[in-house]
Amino acid sequence: MRVARQKIVSILRQRGQQVRADWVERELPELVDLDEHAGLLATLRLDPADLAGASSP
């Protein structure tokens, strides 16, 4: 399953994690594969199950 990178960036910015959000914008593709990037999402303390509700085709 994939989710829009902007959704991840938005969550990080809401948390006040501007530097991490900037990094995600630079390094991740527009559509982020939740399985492929599971380790990174865990590091960012983002639950793929929560993001799945905001998935993109």
Image (tube, rainbow, N blue to C red):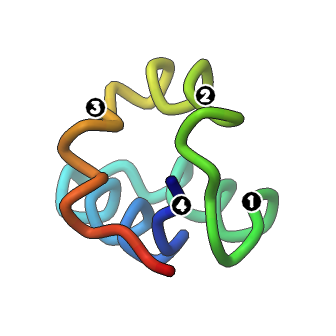
Residue receiving disc 1: 28
* Local secondary structure at mark 2: helix
Mark with earlier residue (4, 1): 4
Residue receiving disc 3: 47
Residue at mark 2 to residue at mark 3: CA–CA distance: 11 Å
Residue receiving disc 4: 2
Instruction: Classify mark 3: residues with Cα within 10 Å, few (<14), some (14-19) or many (20+).
Output: few
Q: Amino acid at mark 3?
A: Asp
Mark with earlier residue (4, 2): 4
Residue at mark 3 to residue at mark 1: CA–CA distance: 17 Å
How far across and down, in percent of the image, does residue 12 sit? 34, 54
> Residue visible at 43% across and 66% down?
9
In the image, residue 6 above or below residue 17: below
Q: Are marks 2 and 3 in contact (CB under 8 Å)?
A: no
Residue at mark 4 to residue at mark 1: CA–CA distance: 12 Å
Using the image, tell me which numbered label, if any, was put on residue 40.
2
Q: Amino acid at mark 4?
A: Arg
Q: Are marks 2 and 1 in contact (CB under 8 Å)?
A: yes
Q: Amino acid at mark 2?
A: Leu
Q: Relative to the observer, which residue lies in front, 23 or 39?
A: 39
